[in-house]
Each structure stands twice: as C-alpha cells, then as structure tokens.
Image (cartoon, coloured by chain):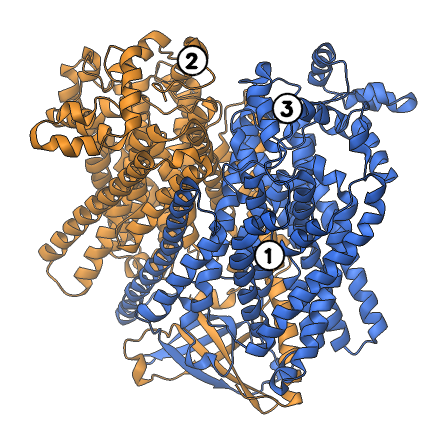
Chain colours: A blue, B orange
Amino acid sequence: MSSKSSKETSIDKSIETSQESRVQINHVSDSMTLLLYLGLLIVTILTVWLFKHRRFRFIHETGLAILYGLIVGVIIRYGSPSYQPSITMISIEDSPEQSNKLPPEKVLVNMSVLNESQIYEYDYKRRLYGNDINAPILDEKATFNPEVFFNFILPPIIFFAGFSMKRKHFFRNIGSILMLAFLGTTISCFVIGGVTFGISRASARLASIVSLSECLLFGAFISATDPVTVLAIFSDLRVEPDLYALVFGESVLNDAVAIVLSESIETYGSAAAAGETAAISVLKAIGSFAGVFLGAIGIGCLLGCLTALITKFTQVREHPLLETSLFVLMSYSTFLAAEAVKSTGIVAVLFCGICQAHYTYNNLSDESKATTMSFFGLLNFLAENFTFVYIGVSVFTYSSHLWDPVFIVAGFLAMIIGRVLCVYPLCGLANIGRRRSGCAIGLSRMHVLAFSGLRGAMAFALAIRNTSSDARKIIFSTTLILVMITVLVCGGLATQMLQWMHIEVGVEEEPNRQRLDRQDSTGEAASQPSLRDRSCIALGWRKIDKNFVKPLLTNARPLLTETCSGCCLPLARLLTTTEQLTQAAVQRDLYSGGQEDTDVIVPPDSDSFAGLGEGGQVNKAGPAAPASLQVATTGDADNNGAASPVLF
Amino acid sequence: MSSKSSKETSIDKSIETSQESRVQINHVSDSMTLLLYLGLLIVTILTVWLFKHRRFRFIHETGLAILYGLIVGVIIRYGSPSYQPSITMISIEDSPEQSNKLPPEKVLVNMSVLNESQIYEYDYKRRLYGNDINAPILDEKATFNPEVFFNFILPPIIFFAGFSMKRKHFFRNIGSILMLAFLGTTISCFVIGGVTFGISRASARLASIVSLSECLLFGAFISATDPVTVLAIFSDLRVEPDLYALVFGESVLNDAVAIVLSESIETYGSAAAAGETAAISVLKAIGSFAGVFLGAIGIGCLLGCLTALITKFTQVREHPLLETSLFVLMSYSTFLAAEAVKSTGIVAVLFCGICQAHYTYNNLSDESKATTMSFFGLLNFLAENFTFVYIGVSVFTYSSHLWDPVFIVAGFLAMIIGRVLCVYPLCGLANIGRRRSGCAIGLSRMHVLAFSGLRGAMAFALAIRNTSSDARKIIFSTTLILVMITVLVCGGLATQMLQWMHIEVGVEEEPNRQRLDRQDSTGEAASQPSLRDRSCIALGWRKIDKNFVKPLLTNARPLLTETCSGCCLPLARLLTTTEQLTQAAVQRDLYSGGQEDTDVIVPPDSDSFAGLGEGGQVNKAGPAAPASLQVATTGDADNNGAASPVLF
C-alpha cells in the first residue's frame, strides 16, 4: 500500500464521512422496520390478551396478526415518504465470459472522481422485469430477505412442534397420520397442480407464463397445512384427543412432506428441462424425494441422539447454563447440517425435536428442563406471530407481486377440491383398519379434518423463497391470498364448525387414567387401548427402544446390563453410567410396574408453557396436557415442587 | 405485462433455474458458515465444562473461544477451496448526477442476452482499495454484516448486564463507579488518542493515513472495558463485593460512555471537516454527548416503566407466555426505538434492563420471572461466546485488515498508559470521599482494577462497524489484536493477580446479614453500612422511588393512597390496583419492618441462572448471589419452592 497525496486523502475522508452517514441512514431505517414489527407484535399480544380476557373468540391471534399487518402495510405503502436511492444504469455487451447468459454475481464499478479512478463492489440482487423497473425501491421498505424465514423463523416453529408433541396420541394414530401426510399431501399436490394447470390454460396470458411443473410446485406449496390456528382453538376447547392428534400429526408431517415434495418437483422440472425423458425425470424426482426425506430424518435423529449421549456421559448437567446452551446449539445445528448437505433442515429439525424430547430431555437437569421448554416455547410463539404479521404487511409492501384473478380463483377452487379428495378417501381407507379397533373416523370428524386445512407459515415461506420469474410471482401472490382467506375464514369459524359437527369438547382425562396411560405408553404392562392402531413394526420398535435405545441414550431403566447378554455385556457395562446404576436402584424401590414415560414433556416448574406452547397457544393446554398438568401439580402431591427422578 | 414469445419464456426458464441453483449455493454456504460457528460454540462449551470439571483455571472460556476461533480461521483461510464468483468490471464516467462524488447506491445493469435486453439490480457493497481488488472474495467466507453485532449480539449482552445487576453493591459504590466510567473513559480516550497520534507521526505512512480525530476514535473504541472474563473469574473466586461492584460498574457504564464518546468524536470530526472552528466543533461534540446519553437514558427508562405499567394494570400475567413475550419485545423495542431516533440503543437497553429488574420484574407471574431470567441469561451467554469466537475467526477471514506494526505497538502502549492514568488518579480522588466512610480503595485493589481493563465485545463491535477507509482498517486490526492480548493474557493471569495482590477471596455473606441487607436496601430502617458512599441526591431519589415510583409502577407497598395526600388522592386511588390492596394487607401481616427489595433478582426456580448468567458465567454466583441463593434455596426454608409474594 503506497502512501497517498493529501488530495487523495481528502477525497477518502469525504467518502468515508458520506459512507458513514449512509450507514447511519440504513441503520435507522433497519431499526424502524424492526421496531414496526415489534410494535405490531406488542399490539397483537395486548389485543389477544384482551380477547382472551373478554372471552371473545371470533378472531384468532393469527388472524389478528394478519389484520394488523394489513393495516400497517397500507400505511407504509401509501403513507410513508419514499426514499429514492441513487441509481446508475449501465449497459454491458455480450461478453465471452457471459456464455451462460447469467448476470455476474458481482459488478465492480470503476468510477473516476477528479481524474482518480475508484473501484466499488456491487452485489447481485435480482432481475428486474417490466413492472419492477418503475418501482425498484418499494421492496426496500419493511421487507426481509426471504432466507430469513427459512433460516431463523421456521426452524423454531417446527422444532417446537416435534419437541412438544403429545407422543402418546400421535403414535396411537400413526397409521392414519402417515397416510394423510404422505399420500394425502401427494394427492393434494397433484390435484391442485392439475386443476390450476387446467384452468390456467383458459387464459392465454397465464398459459404462456405458468407451466405444468410450476402448477405442481404451487400445489406442493399450498398443500402444507398449518397447525397453529386450528390447534390453538382445539386446545382451548379441549377437543377429543384422537381428532386433535389427527389434525396435529397431519399438519406437522404435512409441512415436512410439502417441502420435500416441492424440492422433488423442482428436480423433476430441471430434469425435464434438460431434455430427459418423462420416466427418468419422474424417477429422479421420486429418488430425490426419498433421499432427501430419509437423509433429513437420519440427520435429525443422529444429532438428537448425539445430544442425548453427550448429556448422558458428561457431567455437563452440573452447569445448567452450559447444558441448555449445548441443547439449543445442537438442535439448531441439526437444521444447518441438513441444509449444508442439501437435505431439508425443516424435516431434520422436526425429527431432532422428537428425539430431544424422547431421549435428551430425560438427561437434563431440572433447571435445564424448565429453561429449554420455556425458551423454545417463547421462540415458537414469537416466530409464529411474526410470520403472520409479516404475511399481512407483505401484501402491500412486497414489490414482487403479480396478482392474477384467474389464477387466484383457480387456486382457491383447486385448494378446496384437493382438500376434499385428500381427506375423505384417505379417512375412508384408514377406517378399514380403525373400525377393527372401534375408533373409526366419523363423517363429522372428516368434515372437521377437511375444514382444518388452513395454510400458514410454511406455504408462505415456500412461496416467498423465490420470486424471480413471473410464474413465481403469481404463485407467491396467490399463496398469500389463500393463506389469508383460510386463516381468517376457517380460523374464525372453527369454533362454530365444532359446534355444528357436534364434536365433543371439554374432554378431560381423569388424572388416574392419565397416570396409568403414561406408565403403559412404553411399559410392558400395556393395557388394551394403547395397542389399537399399532402395527407390528411399531410394537417391535417400542420393544427395542425400551430395552436398548433408551437405556443407551438416557439414564432410564432397564439397564443395558440387564437386557444385553453374552459378548455384548462388557460393552453394555461400559455404556451404563454410575448414575444410571444408582438411579435404577432408586427407581426399583419406587415403582414395581412398567417403565415411566411421559406423554408430553412437562417441565417441573413451568407447567403451563408445555401446554401453552403447543400449537403456539397460551393457557390452553391440549387435550392431554391439562390432565398431565394436574398430575404434576395437584393430582400427585409428592411429585410437586422438586421433580422426582422418575417422572422427569 | 405483455405476453411473451416462447423463446423469451425459455430464456426466462433457464435463468430461473440457474437463479435457483445460485440461491441454493448461497444457502448452502450460509448454512455452512453458521454451522461452523455453532460447532465452535459447542466445542467451546464442552471444553469449558471439562476445564471446570477438572478445575483448570489458566484459560478462561472467552480466551478459549478466541483460540478455537483462530484455529478455525486459519483452516478457512488456507484450507478451504475458494469460490470465485463471476465478476464483471464496468467503467463509468463522471456524470452530472454524481456531483457529490459518491458511488450510486444501486446499479442497474442492462445485459443483452440473445439480442434481448435484461435488467439486473445490484446493491452497493463497499469500496475496494488497492489490496482488496486482488482478494475481493475472501470476506465472503464466514463473515457477517457488522450491523448484526449492533442489532442482535450486543443488545442482549448489555441488557442482561443491567437486568442482572447487583443493585445494592452497585449503588453503594455509585460515586466511584460514575467517576471511573465518565471521567475515566474520557481520560483514557484522550490519552490513548494523544499517544497513538504522537507515535504515529513518527511513521510517514501512518501520518498520511491516520488523523487526530481517528486516533481519538480509536481511543474511544479501546476505552470500553469488557466485564465478561474478569467478572466471571471474580464470581468464581468470590472476590470481595466492593471490588467486584467497582469492576462491574465501571465496565458496564464504560461501554455506554465509550459508544456515545465515539459518536461525539465523529460529530466533532465532521464538524471540523466542515470547516467550523475548534471551539464550535468541541461544543457540538459535548452537546451531542449529553444529548445522546440523556436521550438514551430517557428512552430506556420510559419504555422500561411503560412495561411495568402494562404488566401492572392488565391481567396479562394470567397468560405467562404472552407476558414473557411482551417483556422481551418491549425490551428489544427500547434498543430499536433509541436507534431509530439516532440515539444509542446500547445505552437505552442498559437502563431499560435496570428498570425492568427494579420495577417490571416484580409485577410478573412466577413463571414469567423464571422464564425471562433464563431466557436472557441464555441469550447473553450465547451472544458473548459467539462474539469471542467471531473475534478469533475474523483475524484470518476478514478481508478489511490492515496490519500496521507501528500502530499496534503504539496502541498497546497507549492502552496501558491510558489505563494507568485513568485508574490510579481517579481512585485517589474517590478515596477522599471513601476514606470518611472507611472504605478507601487500597493500592492492591487499584492494581487489580487497572489489570481488569480487558477489551472485548464492545471494542470489537465499535471497530468492525466501519472499515471503509484505510485508517478505519488499521484501527480495526489493532483493536482486534488488543482484544485478543488482553483477553488471553489478563484473563489467564487474573487468578494469579488476585493471589499476588492478596485480595480477599471466598467471601461469603452469611444468610442472615444478607437477609437484613436486602430489607434495608430500600427500607427505612437502613443500617449504617448502606448509607456510606451515598450522596443526598441518591438518598432523596431512594425516598421518592420507594414512596411514589415503586407503588405507581409495581404492586409494592406503601400504597400511593398512603403516601399521597390532598388533591392527588383520587388519582392515587385510580393508580392503585385491587391486587395491590389485597397484597399490601398480606405483606403487612408478614413483615413489620421495611419494604422488601431484592438485590439481585433470583427467579424462584432457576436460581443458578441468576448467578451464573451474571458476567456470562456458569455456576459461579457473584459475591452476593451465593448468599442470596442460599436464602432462596436453603437458608430460608419457607421461601423454597413456590415463591412467596413478598420475596419475588
């Protein structure tokens, strides 16, 4: 670096000062934007409290968040002065390096100032289409990089869904849930894709923009149903647990399937575009689906179990803050690890959440239990509500909109047809198996299930991720409309719907039965009801889990030294901690029955967070949670206060 | 939008597909970067646990984080394949619109692809200097936008410092702390600025790059001492509370002063650059300092008190999740609000934290108390350790470095001289007042205080914020070196230093005295020790706080109806909640002495978080905290488990 003349230095200084004021302006506007969203969330929370306080149920907090967002979006769009940044237009010719016809990722601009050349670096942002060129600035206001949703907003929501899952009822209905999630989402995706493709052929303009694979992509986006709103209402009203489990299980797995499905369709699209035959393209898409899904499940379970091993074999629980940090970091690493290997972080984080709840949680100190539960509950709540506020605001402030009435109507019709063709036939199919165990899904339950197909954060996040082409813009705008309609209409009418369909509400499981259920949920002395709707594989897995996986990953009984035999014994001894040995002795004295297992994790001290958090809801414990809360807080006095080593 | 030909559509498709793969590549690399930092944090946490477990004290977790960061930085820099994005170089001439000689904020590139013109938008990133042009890509690896530190990493650290402050010991030493923080930081800033300016004149190259105002800026950056490392060690060893309070108070307020000071110097710099006289420039700088500081304190206290009012006058505590969310959102809003009005969010958030702890915390439900404490404790811990990891990594990966040995040596000498000239004279000055109350700061304590001047997150964040000019790059690189040296050397030798200086460690306040202290910390029956080192203003404020502010903002006694008289009575009645009336009755029965007030907030159920979190440390309660923990957990059996309405 050579020394400079004083003139050059003075130019440097002036640029530095101006640069600083530019940094300052950007910083102020960033702060204003964030403050705006925080203010919206605060107002939403206060209104939600007021509505809860006054028992007003016609609009749910998510709907409220959207409405507030819409109002503020209008104000930002039409009320605030627009800041016009300085823009320079440059033309470049076809150069040999640009053979792939792609714009360069960076542009270095050589500007001569007072006969001295200065070089500035510019980053690629996006392609401007006809309409954008007139309004390239608007999207600077109150918008975030869509990747923020995928990297920071969705993971806590999905992780918490897995972490707070009521595993007992989920696994009781696992057959129906898997069918609805996998087969149902696929059916829904293809029906929606087909219907929108068909209808959009009627419009010459649409036909030239939207292709079949884009319609299918739209189908995949819009097939992800959202658990937040409906489940909150279900929890509040204490709807019967089986129906709750069906809706919860379907919407959680739905999200996972939809995201992988959309990736597969993109794989198909690019394979087809590369001129490969339809059969190979389809095979590639199916392969991608299976690979991504299984890979994500593998990564999620692996890192979840690794956390369990670390928390079991180190004494990190002596330092709750370190332990909690480790737990949080490992959970988020799961998402990133899956994304880094091009799998799907959302799916990984869901299964990581399930593993963390099933294994790691049992190894944590009492403090860490309470802290992790409340930490993720809080993150989940904030992330959900932020998403809905953002959905509302972005209707007006996002510049990549392309409203096409034909496509919106087509999408709306297709969504309804897709939902009907997904729920009713599959429930009928599921009933073949369920009737034997006497728990068939009645017609009114099917209506509720179909009605519960709200679209939310996942559909929005998938659609906003790429709005580079016109087709993607149409898809995004239509998705936004459908999310708002379903959340406002279905969310507002959900309580009515339950009344009309005569669905049993206010279901309380008596503490004693609950207690028993808990014991038999992995115990050998399982009573008949818990066996229904369970396949041999599920039962086999339960046995392995109880005898080998749980003793390996947690300090639970039976000891590996008791279940392993022969040459594995030395290894089993190695993998059994001293704590496990002493604790097992204590447990043996306390309980002579089957092994304890919790249905939904209830931290010793922040009970209501467990119930509340589920489905993003407040003071609305789920169908099973209130009973289990009663167990922990009133039903079972000696478990109150400091948690016994058995229950938690 | 007109319809397109099939050729145009096919170009669109190919661009969309490529665009998607580009988005995918960026996403994978973002995920890898984040994963890297999370992995580093996980390894740091596990090592910290191991060191704690083995009682190995020669390196502290922050030093460890830096070391791990350095190792990984080297690997990234030299080990990973470099990804070369496509770059196009463009020259533009002096155009009339560019009269201010600033580069445009956006560049629109018109590229003709197959004779069709396409327009792409590019965002300004930075100016490239001589060296940068050869390595414009390296900084893409494993670096974040510096604004991330200011907007997301620093606020939780500083908020938690205020929130978890041991107010009793802090206010006992308030006089000395304020002197050290305000006068000391100013002295340190000007001494460092002067010394570096003087030494740098010896090098012709440096003299042409670094001006006086930049040296002063460097002085302001490097005057911010960091509480994390030393306080963690102090807590661990239970150093005598007065010394702890001095170091804590100085470093916390230091940060606030340094950030405002650096802004004032920039104001001075631009005023001087605009050709104003020195006197006016100095006056402007002082005005800016006072305005920004008082404004920030005002905003912090205002929003803190507003939160207290909301939590007092609504029944939102019936829904702990809503309450906690509100608390978190309001606290973060304070930062953003201050930034949005061009004040200093960091200072605002510090005072907001103090208000939240002093007022709002008392209104929260027990669950929210535990959750807020553990939530902010966790955020603080993660943010701190992330900063130190990032400091380590950025030594090698950040491309805006300019290592100048002369400036580094000058900075190092200046830092030592500045610290000495700040601590010893001011402590001597403080001793004039302190000697009367028999608690003078001895020479060995002064040595420890001087030695505790580690530099950390704040110095780093201030320096990384703007690295646009060569001077700023030199400042940044030097700051980085000084942070590392002080954290590794002083952090590693702190335990030794305490031994050499014969500082009393292992100080335990017996529960009973602690209990008494607590009562008298705002009670009328204050015993003599708590009066020392307190001015009339402090005592006057305590009276107003106790009689009017606390009863207004919390449900504490005495009631406003008891302290107000005459025409204020109707208003006082309006501002007294029914809960306050009933609770007051309960309290009156329980305690006949002065009003309860906690020194440091200890949530009912996650005690160790309160102590641990402080100073980012784990299982190392501060000098007062262990005793208070004992009060809560063992010393006072009837306060165990469910919190009594009085203590919490």
Question: On the image, numbered disc 1 is attached to which residue?
Answer: A454
From the viewer's perspective, is residue B304 above or below residue B620? below
Crowd band around label 1 with a 10 angstrom C-alpha radius: few (<14), some (14–19), many (20+): many
Residue A511 image label: 3
The amino acid type of the residue labelled 3 equals: Pro
Question: On the image, numbered disc 2 is attached to which residue?
Answer: B630
Q: Residue at x 29, y 61 (%)?
A: B208
Which quadrant of the view contains residue A329? top right
Q: Is residue A448 left or right of residue B182?
A: right
Residue at the extreme left of the image, as rendered: B566
Q: What secondary structure is found at the residue carrying circle 1?
A: loop
Q: What secondary structure is found at the residue carrying circle 2?
A: helix
Which quadrant of the view contains residue B155? top left
* Disc 2 with disc 1 on a shared chain: no
User: Residue B337 at what x, y percent from top left?
Assistant: 30, 51
From the viewer's perspective, is residue A116 above or below residue A387? below
Q: What secondary structure is found at the residue carrying circle 3?
A: helix
- The Cα atoms of the two marked residues, 3 and 2, are separated by 35 Å
Question: Marks 3 and 1: which is nearer the front?
Answer: 3
